[in-house]
Each structure stands twice: as structure tokens, then as C-alpha cells.
Amino acid sequence: MLGAPRRYSWLVRTLGIRELASGVGLLIEPQQRRWAWTRVAGDAMDLALLAVTFGIPRVNRAWQGAITAAVAGMTLVDLYAATKRNAPSLSGAVTPSLGMETGSHAPLESWRGSGLAEDVGANVRPGEEGESDEVKQRMMREAERELGLPQR
């Protein structure tokens, strides 16, 4: 698509192997930022090679621009990941908090009327059991406001 002669197909394969090595390194050692930096270095090489294609007259400029924009975007993402101090681990799944963990100050029921807290058997905080529906409704409105949910 970028007009490179077929004799350089080995270069494309080499770049692919480099990307696979970086990916394997990130999976094996997710806390090692050096693997993220190998991705940034690889992106810089890719951008340099793309810059060379701008001198080839038979290149489809639309594809060239789209590919260059995509690589530049991924370079920014990789650069962010490499410079972030507390990079998240790829070794465990990320689970969203439902506000029911031990010691949480979040409301026990995150969605209006869902009954989620009761469904999973979440413990009720002391003093909450005998409260009236009016008090519970007020607490839910406060929680909605704190969570930034649209007001009813």
C-alpha cells in the first residue's frame, strides 16, 4: 500500500518479530517498564520508515496518512504507558468496584432500585436495618448526587 519494493519484505517481517517480542516481554514481566520503552522505540522506527514513504511518488496518500496517523496515535499511547509511574499490571483482571468491599464508604446499592446489595448478600452497616423508607430514599438521592448520576 505504501509503494515499498518487494525486496524489503524482510523488513516488515523483522518489524513484526520486534512487536511480538515486546508483547511477550510485557506479558511475562508486566511491571518492567523497559518493555513499554521497547514499544516506544519501535514506534519511532515505524514513524521514521513511514517518513521515507512520503518520497515515493506512487503511494496512495490517503492510506499513507491513515497509517501514519494510526502509528502516531499508538506512539502516544505507548509513550504514556512507558512514562506512567504506577503502570497497571496486566497479570490480573480489572474488576469494577460495586461499593461493597470491606470498609467501603460507598453506598451498598450503586444502581437505583437494582437490589444488587441484597442479591449478593452484602452486609448492612450498623444502624441501617431499621431505618424508614424515607431515610433510605434520602440516602439514595445523596449517593446519586455524589456519584454524579442524573437526578430523578
Image (cartoon, rainbow, N blue to C red):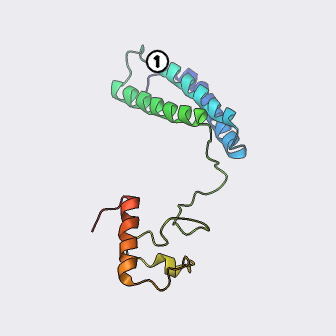
Q: Is residue 104 left or right of residue 113?
A: right
**Circle 1 sits on which residue?**
51
Q: Amino acid at mark 1?
A: Ala
Task: Work out whether 145 lies above or below 138.
Answer: above
Q: Please state the total of marks drawn on the protein image.
A: 1
x and y, in percent, of residue 96 in the image: 53, 61
Q: Is residue 103 left or right of residue 130?
A: right
Residue at 38 percent across and 15 percent down: it is: 57
x and y, in percent, of residue 68 in the image: 43, 27
x and y, in percent, of residue 74 in the image: 49, 34
* Nearer-the-camera pick, 24 or 32: 32
x and y, in percent, of residue 88 in the image: 61, 46
Residue at 62 percent across and 68 percent down: it is: 102
Q: Quadrant of residue 139?
A: bottom left
* Nearer-the-camera pick, 79 or 128: 128
Residue at 58 percent across and 36 percent down: it is: 84
Residue at 36 percent across and 58 percent down: it is: 148
- State the SS at label 1: helix
Quick one: quadrant of the N terminus?
top left
Q: Quadrant of residue 92?
A: bottom right
Quick one: quadrant of the C terminus?
bottom left
